[in-house]
Structures are given as C-alpha cells and as structure tokens.
Image: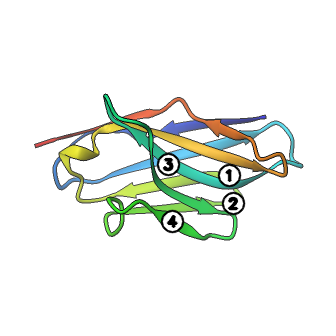
C-alpha cells in the first residue's frame, strides 16, 4: 500500500514558476516504487502525462513540458518534484502525483493539487 501526498500548487501569472512536490509513504518496505510521474487534468480534458522518472533516473516528458518542466526524484526520501517554469495559461489544471510499485505493478494516485496560471 502506498499513499501519495502532493504539495506546492497555487496561483501564478504567466511566465512564472511553481514547484510541486510529492511524498510517498509505503506500508511495506519490500515494495519499491518503480516509477513516479506527474499527470494533469484540465476541466473537460482527459488526464495526461506531464513527466515521469524511473528508479534509474530515466526521465520522460510530454512535448508541452520539454524545456520548461523538470522532474526529479529523491530515492532516499521517496519524493518526486516537478519544477515548472515559464508557465502558460494552458498549464492550468489539477496536477496528480502517480506511482507504480514493483513487483506487483500497482498504480497509486495522490489527491491532486491545483495549478492556476493567469495572464
């Protein structure tokens, strides 16, 4: 069992920056979190991947995130952060932390944190 807790959302003007953090709490130490990701969902849209990071620090980004967002993980603290720069109005969404455990390959989600970008 894994619980994910996000923090760091808020309201910012276009061109501004925000840093999202997510801390994982594991009930069993023999379960590893193989992949940690950030997704987002804007009103009326489907949830979409923003970026993910494996335990081997392999990172992948959606096209809209490349060059503006940076994902990073701290394996010892079981945290993942998302640094977002040059924010645009279209980045407004609820951002969700996601984790996939190994070896059982289960998916877990945080409750989401609102990011609002205004012009």
| Distance between mark 3 and mark 4 Cα atoms | 11 Å
State the separation of the CA atoms marked 3 and 1.
14 Å
Q: Nearer the viewer, mark 2 or mark 4?
A: 4
Looking at the rendered image, the disc whose residue lies closer to the viewer, 1 or 4, is 4
Q: Which secondary structure lies at badge 4?
A: strand
Q: CA distance from mark 1 to mark 2?
A: 5 Å
Q: Is residue 4 above or below residue 88?
A: above
Disc 1 + disc 2, Cβ < 8 Å? yes
At label 4, counting other C-alpha atoms closer than 10 Å, the crowd grade (few under 14, some 14-19, many 20 or more) is some
Image quadrant holding the N terminus, namely top right
Percent position (x, y) of residue 60? Answer: 51, 65
Q: Residue at x 44, y 47 (%)?
A: 20
Disc 1: which residue: 78
Residue 97: x and y in percent read 54, 42
Q: Identify the element where label 1 is drawn.
A: loop
Which residue is identified by label 3? 38
**Which residue lies under the disc numbered 4?**
60
Ranked by sequence position, the earlier of labels 3 and 1 is 3
Upstream in the sequence, badge 1 or badge 4?
4
Quarter of the C terminus within the rendering: top left
Q: Mark 1 near mark 4, Cβ–Cβ under 8 Å?
A: no
Which residue is rendered at x = 89% and y = 49% of the image?
30
Instruction: Provide the residue designation for mark 2.
Output: 75
- Name the N-terminal-most of marks 3 and 4: 3
């Amino acid at each position: 069992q894994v619980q994910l807790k996000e923090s760091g959302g808020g309201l910012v003007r276009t061109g501004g920056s925000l840093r999202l953090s997510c801390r994982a709490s594991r009930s069993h130490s023999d379960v590893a979190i193989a992949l940690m990701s950030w997704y987002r969902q804007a009103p009326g849209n489907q949830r979409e991947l923003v970026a993910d990071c494996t335990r081997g620090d392999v990172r992948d980004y959606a096209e809209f995130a490349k060059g503006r967002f940076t994902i990073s993980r701290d394996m010892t603290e079981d945290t993942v952060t998302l640094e977002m720069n040059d924010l645009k109005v279209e980045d407004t969404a609820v951002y969700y932390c996601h984790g996939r455990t190994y070896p059982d390959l289960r998916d877990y989600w945080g409750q989401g944190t609102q990011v609002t970008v205004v012009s």
